[in-house]
Amino acid sequence: MKLKVFGAAIALSVLALGSSVANAADYPERPISVMVSYGAGGATDFQARIVTMMAGGEDFLTQPIVIINKPGAGGRVGWNWFATEAENDGYTLGAYNIPHFVAQSIEGGVKYSADSFEPIANWGSDPAVVVVGKDSEYNTIGELVDFAKANPGKVTLSGAGLYVGHHIAALQMEKATGAKMAYIPTKGGGAAAMKAVIAGDVIAGINNLSDAYRAREAGNVKILAVADLERNEQFLPDVPTFMEAGYEVDNSSVNFRGLMVPKGTDPAIIDMLAEKVPAMFEHARVKKQMDAGGSPLKIMTRAEVQKMWADREVYLTELLAGLK
């Protein structure tokens, strides 16, 4: 009886292996979904819809991609779901945001870490910027900081959540200026944070360059500073970096975005995605739409993203310890 059971187990294992190989060879046979941990209309959602627009092409994935939004708690809701409940069959991808999910896993209280996911490719890097409403009395970052120093705690700053790039930029800004400010994480991600600035619910906000660029083009905000090592000559050539303004705020909060799959996804499927997705990001139609939306492209391969994730985890562990 034991021999029969053992033989049956081997047979089932072989069948399962054969099924897996066949599935990988035929992949994809149906539309693919991409989970975005932020609400519709924000930078991650907006860009994910653009960079996946060519997915159905014969040279790419041959199947369309559908965006599924699971916002909440600065991305925690979506990434917790992706790490614990998403199928690892290649038909559910996720959009990642670095430093967000890495910083959140360092701080704790979540069900994921970098080891929970397998990166596929990176599509962009979006620096944090400081914005104020179009009618604000502040026209420079220096004017805003001077008011904050003279009025501790009175400058309210909206942002997309806790331990996302916006929050890290706010912590760095406080440390660099010596000014006490009130960071207010908003429900709904960057789109909601920007609405709070436009509506006058907060004195200022820290948001993504891409969101801020579109809001400024619409005449709704002024952009005072960018948290990066250099000015963005393509989209915001007139906006100084914090460092140019005399404040030691670097590029730690720059938001890297890309696609990943859950741990345990078939390596053959990962390899196929790693080959096709960067080429999809590089398509001329994608670049045109990203440029029109003020969204900086930063295309990186799977190997490059793996190194970036590892480097950022080491760096953010030290940075966050120093900001407390």
Image (cartoon, rainbow, N blue to C red):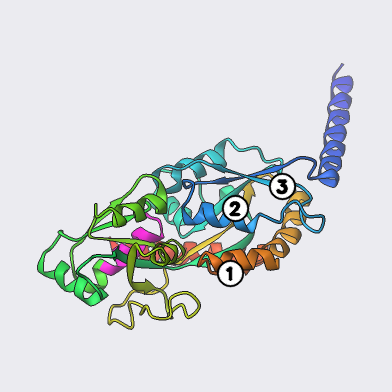
Q: Position of residue 174 (x, y in %)?
A: 24, 67
The amino acid marked with disc number 3 is Pro
* Between marks 1 and 3 in the image, the one whose residue lies nearer the viewer: 3
Of helix, strand and loop, which one carries label 3?
A: loop
Task: Give the quarter of the figure containing the C terminus.
Answer: bottom left
For the view shown, which residue lies furthest in the front direction?
219
Give the magenta range: 163-173
Of helix, strand and loop, which one carries label 2?
A: helix
In terms of image quadrants, where is residue 127? Answer: bottom left
| Residue named by callout 2 | 49
Give left or right: position of 102 versus 195: right
Contact, mark 1 vs mark 3 (Cβ under 8 Å): no
Local crowd size for mark 2, using a 10 Å CA cut-off: few (<14), some (14–19), many (≥20): some
Mark pair 1, 3: CA separation: 23 Å
Q: Is residue 271 visible?
A: yes
| Residue named by callout 1 | 298
